[in-house]
Amino acid sequence: MSIRKLSQHLVNQIAAGEVVERPSSVVKELIENALDAGATEIEVRIEGGGRELIEVSDNGSGIGADELLLAVSPHATSKIATADDLVDISSYGFRGEALASVGSVSRLVVVSRSAASQNGASIEVDFGAFSSVRPAAIAQGTRVEVHQLFGQVPARRKFLRSDPTEAGKVVDVIEWLALGRPGVAFRLFQHARMTLELPAVDDPQLRVEAVLGDEFKGKLLPVELSGAGAVAIWGLIGRPEQAKASANGLRMVLNGRPISDRGLLHAMREAYRGLVEPGRTPVGFIAIDIDPREVDVNVHPAKSEVRFRQPALIHSALLRAVRSALQAANLVPNLPMGGASLGSSFVWGARRNESGGVNSNLSNDFNQHLPSDTSTHAWQNASFTPHASDGDRGFEFSALRDALALGRAQNVGEANAEATLLTPPRPAARFLQAGKAWLITFDADGIVIVDQHALHERVMFEQLRAKLTVGALPSQPRLVSSMISLNGEQLERLEASQELLARLGFDVRASGPKSATIFAEPLFLVERKVDVGQMIVNWLSRERATTEDGEAVLSEVLDMMSCKAAVKAGDALSDIEIASLLQDLHRVERATNCPHGRPTAMRIPFRELERRFGRG
């Protein structure tokens, strides 16, 4: 077959396959053009999920009539002029492909008027066929209409999802772009009905809360890092219990540009390691501001992937910023109690039995666990303090920081009223063990209920990790070795894990095509009477038993060891054991969550009790 040169129309359609994946891709490109034009108000209209109509209007600088034909031509742009410009890109768009690609797979209409012109003009591209430039009535700015997307490319059109799904993707794109530009107003209309409105705001926190939803209002933790060389970070992140099963609730922008970066996602998950359950991703918004010369955004036509000149520096900065934010906050969640009344059958320290009498077991259990050296009226007299009812484009960190500082100064009273605690709950002198599973005490802000297994698991995890920093864990050889059955994949993982197992105090070696022998085990597991053989089989059955992320593997096996060795629900604890464990709630790092990410404690605020008892 002879070699031939493709027609320009076919080239544009091929390019459209990379730039225009679905209606939301078109919306993204058109909004980015509007932002580059300096728009402060952007309105989007869609019909049929965007496949029938996409219309984006803005009040930006507009396009002159003499440049309209160039605007819809391939590889024509006002953003760059030379190859040197590619290393210092400060605009959203720069490739000059978007309008030409969209015009090749739809009927495209562009209407615009520049600030220097008294009259507007329009041009139409009908699936690659250009019309002449015509006069048109329009205020300063640009309106782009996209009709019948993929109308003559049925192979592409049939792969689009349902109208609601495609419309949802459009909402996601608008919200993501809006997060990086809080000073720009956005509106979305679907079939002439406004379904999204994001007014321009001076305080970026208001924009983040508007996008993430009411459930996060006033509950997000601030993240801020400046003075770290070329990197500045600001953001708002959710508490661990707000993490989602997918990564859709975490948005990141780089110099105002929405990005998806696996390295940054890894940094976020590392920062939350042990605070959220495996497989869940934290929620929030992170804005990173760096010198444009330190990042390459010319990786893919969609421009959502970037390549950093110093990826380790960015990863470390984000990890440090988020960890600092989490460490500064009290992560003990308040226990949601709903709106129902406790009811007349509830008696503190007692339970009514079926005959209507009072079962005093809980009250007796409470009295039995009071230390003898403190008076029983300590609870009654407890004192507490209840809560009182850099360019003209892109993400500008300094302005954002100043706006936040101003907002904090203006609302200092409100901030103090609902501020997150800065110190972990400190256990009181009084406590009880309820149901042989829960430790109940109080701190300055409320009654604290502790899961004894989860807290002990976290304590052992941190102790083991600290010991590993100075050497291998103490090991005890078995008087009689024991054999475990393993399949081929498990044996392969065992062989790859020998160095790690030796650090942890294990001596486990393959002894046959389907078996391994345990010769030694960690001393503390012996003391805790853990079934080491079954634990090793369970661990080697996991896909993450061996990965390139050594820290993740270590954390996972330490987590399993701690879980097996920790006290269980149903274990009766002595007063000394309970007091020691409760002290660890504020001595051990990340004691608010077990290594799996589940909470170790929850608090019933005194203000909630006051409300329930009619004292509010």
Image (tube, rainbow, N blue to C red):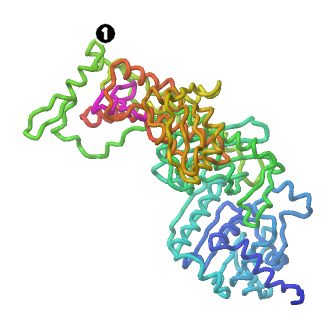
Residue 26 seen:
yes
Looking at the picture, does residue 62 appear above or below residue 471?
below
Q: Quadrant of residue 549?
A: top right
Read off the magenta span: 433-454
* Residue 202 can be seen in this image: no
Residue 579, image x, y percentages: 38, 20
Residue at (19%, 36%) from the top-left corner?
A: 346
Residue shown at the point (46%, 51%) measured from the top left: 214
Foreground of the two, 151 or 6: 6
467 or 595, nearer to the observer: 467
Q: Is residue 169 magenta?
A: no
Give the residue number, with chain letter if any, for mark 1. 373
Which residue occupies the extreme left position in the image?
355
Q: Position of residue 60 (x, y in %)?
A: 72, 65
**Mark 1 neighbour class, 10 Å CA radius: few under 14, some 14 to 19, many 20 or more:** few
Disc 1, SS: loop
Which residue is most to the top? 373
Label 1 amino acid?
A: Asp
Q: Which image quadrant for residue 13? A: bottom right
Q: Is-magenta flag for residue 443?
A: yes
Q: How many numbered callouts?
A: 1
- Measured from the top left, where is residue 141 in percent x and y? 72, 69
Magenta stretch prevailing secondary structure: strand
At a point 68% along the width and 67% down the height, the residue shown is 58
The quarter of the image holding the C terminus is top left
